[in-house]
Structures are given as structure tokens and as C-alpha cells.
Image: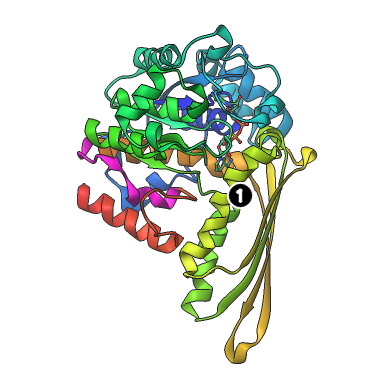
Amino acid sequence: MRIWLIGAYGIVSTTAMAGAMAIQKGVAPKTGLVSELPPFNGIERYAPFSFEFGGHEIRTMENAYEAAKEHWELNRHFERDILDSVKDELENIVAERGTALNCGSGIEGLGKISTLEDEGMTLREIADRIIEDIKKFADDETVVINVASTEPLPNFNEEYHGTIDGFERMIDEDRKEFASASMLYAYAALKLKLPYANFTPSAGSSIPALKQLAEENGVPHAGNDGKTGETLVKTTLAPMFAYRNMEVVGWMSYNILGDYDGKVLSARDNKESKVLSKDKVLEKMLGYSPYSITEIQFFPSLVDNKTAFDFIHFRGFLGRLMKFYFIWDAIDAIVASPLILDIARFLLFAKKRGVRGVVKEMAFFFKSPMDTNVINTHEQFEVLKRWFAELS
Ligand code: NAD
């Protein structure tokens, strides 16, 4: 199968590409891949473990190998042999130039960038170019995944975002102030009838106009924002308090990270969407909202080694207050990248089984899953297994 990555030179993208190729060559194990677990035996028939990659980018680099090497030199996040073993394949992946419309001040931290709007293109020209780029690469087994930097919250407009007619009118009227890059990429994918996933908290396909397009074109899509680190632990642990009828009165999450993602997220406008995405989970899961602090700060020397400190204040029998602390100290790209391959496989499976619209059964992979209130990781895993079993 083929995967088109938006943000192809990022650390999650390049680690997913390098990892997939190394596994295909037999030089790396399949640990960390959900789709390889026994309940999903049979996925191979619909989406074999065999990948080709392409994508869009705004950073100007030679190819995916150069990007992967730059990330590797900063992070050393896997054995160097793995990178060397897939050098030729990565060198052949050259991303197309994308758009950064309304991507916020955070992307200034990315260094030298080049975008389609720099050429003075209209919204229609940008959308058409993106569609053309993806079309050249895509076949019947292609999935598009957004792994680009997080955008600020969108400037939601009922007229332009409420229906697909309105959305296309926005493009034709060149109303750039209402479009965001992630919406345009999602539009391109769904227009081409390619399954789409949004691994970021950006708008992507979550606006009503694009949900309508997915339904009308019979395409499955999923998102938003990969659930990989602190939120994964939080949504796995919080149910424990609920099961024992203990009240969570306060939850503080303090995240520090370096790297490009940390740099972009340290910009206030870009951070806002991530904090919201992380914050909502407790309320949805517990049914009430404990006092909560969610903070994300840039800490350069950590690079991709994201560290989260969590403090939970909870009340038990006789109203007694107690405390629980945890520290999550993981390499962000290592926990995120296998999910890119999993999500792509499950979406292709969904397409082949005739699923259209939001695949809410894939909530397991996301912090802010669309169209479902199932946030508890244990329940989400059961839902995913049942869905897969029923459809296959
Ligand atoms: P990164 O900064 O290494 O990669 C992002 C890439 O996207 C960069 O190469 C950047 O140049 C590119 N980019 C930015 N805007 C673009 C645009 N408009 N079009 C095309 N390319 C664009 O970040 P990362 O650590 O790889 O994370 C990628 C995304 O995934 C972020 O939005 C992050 O919040 C999200 N995410 C990551 C994790 C994780 O565990 N790592 C979990 C959930 C979500």
C-alpha cells in the first residue's frame, strides 16, 4: 500500500518511513505495531505490511533521507544501522511543496520554508496543485495522513465550513483567511476518494463540510491527534479511579519537549489547539471536570525525548484525599510512528470493507476522536477489536 504524508520530513514521518522499510527488510522487529497483534490477524489480506511513501512538505530539503538523518543526529532515537539500511529508499522520497496557509506563528521556528502561496497562487490553484501532486502518486490502495506541525485553532465560519458547497465557494472566492493548510490537504484526499487520517490536533477533515464530502464520496476518515504519550497514560489510568468510585479532584499535566514540534507548540496560537485536545479527555471520561492544569513548554536539550509530569489529587473512602504521581519519559517519534502504519492499514481495511465517513471505531488511536465519547483506552481497544472482527 501507499501512504502520502503531509509533513513528510518531520520526525514522526521519517521514523515511520524508515521503520516500515527496515521491517520490510527484516532488520527491525514489529514491536509497537497494534495491527500486528493477534486480534487483528487477517489484516494482511486487506493491507499487507508493504509500504511506499510520498508526501508534502514546506521545509526545503533534498529528500527524506536528509531529513531523517537530521532528526537522527539530534535524537539518536534508534540504531544507526537501521537508518543506513534504508538510505537508498529514503533518498528516493522527495516531497512536493505544500501550503502553510494560516499555520500560525509557530512554523517560523521551522527555519527556511517554501510554500505554494509564496508563488502568489490563489486558493483554487493551491487546492488543484495539491490534488494533482497526490493524484500522481496515488493508486487504489493509498491513504493520506496529516503529520504536519500543529496549526492554531481555525477561524470557523458556518458559511464556508458548514457544507461542501460553501467550502468550494470559499476556494473559488479565494477567501484565504478562512482556509487552513490541513483543511486543504484533507479536501484533496477526500476529493480523490482516498482515506484520510489526521494525526494532529489541526482542523483537517473534522469540519462539517469535509465530513459531508467524505460521506458523499464514500471515503473513510479518522482523527484527531494521535494518542501516544501522556494522554495515552491518562486515559488508561483515569478509568481506574472511576471503577473504584474514587473522585479525581485535580489533575496537573506538565509536558516539556524539544525538537521542531516543541518549538511550534511553544507559540501560543499553535499551543492552544493541543492543550484543548489534551484537556477535554478527563471531562469526557469521568463525566465531570476535575480542576486541571495542562502545560506544554519548549525544552530544547530534550529534543524528541518528551517528558510529562503528572500529579493527581483524588478522594477515596470517607472523603480522604490522596495523591498519585507519574512521569512519562518517552521518545515521541518512537511511540507515534508505528501508529501511522497502523492507522493507514486500518483505514485501507475500512475502505475495502465499504466503510464511509468518520471511522469512530478507530478512536483508540486518537486524543480527540471524532464523533464519539469513548475516550477510555480499554473500551476503545474492545471497540476496535469488535469492529475488526465483525467486518472481516
Ligand atoms: P515535526 O516538527 O518533526 O514534523 C512536522 C513536519 O511538518 C515538519 O517537517 C514541518 O516542516 C512540516 N510541516 C509543517 N507545516 C506544514 C504544512 N502546512 N504542510 C506540509 N508540511 C508541513 O513534528 P513531529 O514530532 O513529527 O509531529 C508531527 C505532528 O504530529 C505534530 O502536529 C504533532 O503535534 C503531532 N503529534 C505527534 C505525536 C507524537 O507523539 N510525536 C502525538 C500526537 C500528535
User: How far across and how far down the image is residue 71, in percent?
Assistant: 67, 28
Q: Quadrant of the N terminus?
A: top left
Residue 291 vertical placement versus 266 (above, below): below
Whether label 1 lies within 8 Å of ligand 1 gets the answer no
Residue 325 vertical placement versus 314 (above, below): above
**Residue at image point 53% right, 28% down:** 18
Front-lying residue, 312 or 232: 312
User: How far across and how far down the image is residue 233, in percent?
Assistant: 56, 59
User: How far across and how far down the image is residue 254, in percent?
Assistant: 70, 55
Front-lying residue, 390 or 60: 60
Residue 198 vertical placement versus 392 (above, below): above
Q: Residue furthest bottom?
A: 318
**Residue at image point 20% right, 38% down:** 354
Give the quarter of the image for residue 221. Answer: top left
Q: How many marks?
A: 1
Q: Is residue 29 visible?
A: no
State the colouring used for the structure image.
Answer: rainbow
Residue 373 vertical placement versus 270 (above, below): below
Give the quarter of the image for residue 149. Answer: top right
User: How far across and how far down the image is residue 134, in percent?
Assistant: 39, 17
Q: Is residue 97 visible?
A: yes
Residue 376 vs residue 80: left or right? left
Q: Residue furthest right?
A: 301
**Residue at image point 54% right, 66% down:** 237
> Few, some or many C-alpha atoms within 10 Å of disc 1 (few <14, some 14-19, many ≥20)?
some
**In the rendered structure, which segment of residues is drawn in magenta?**
352-365
Residue 99 vs residue 304: left or right? left
Residue denoted by label 1: 275
Quarter of the render that holds ligand 1: top right
Give the quarter of the image for residue 205. Answer: top left
**Amino acid type at image mark 1:** Val
Is residue 177 shown in magenta?
no
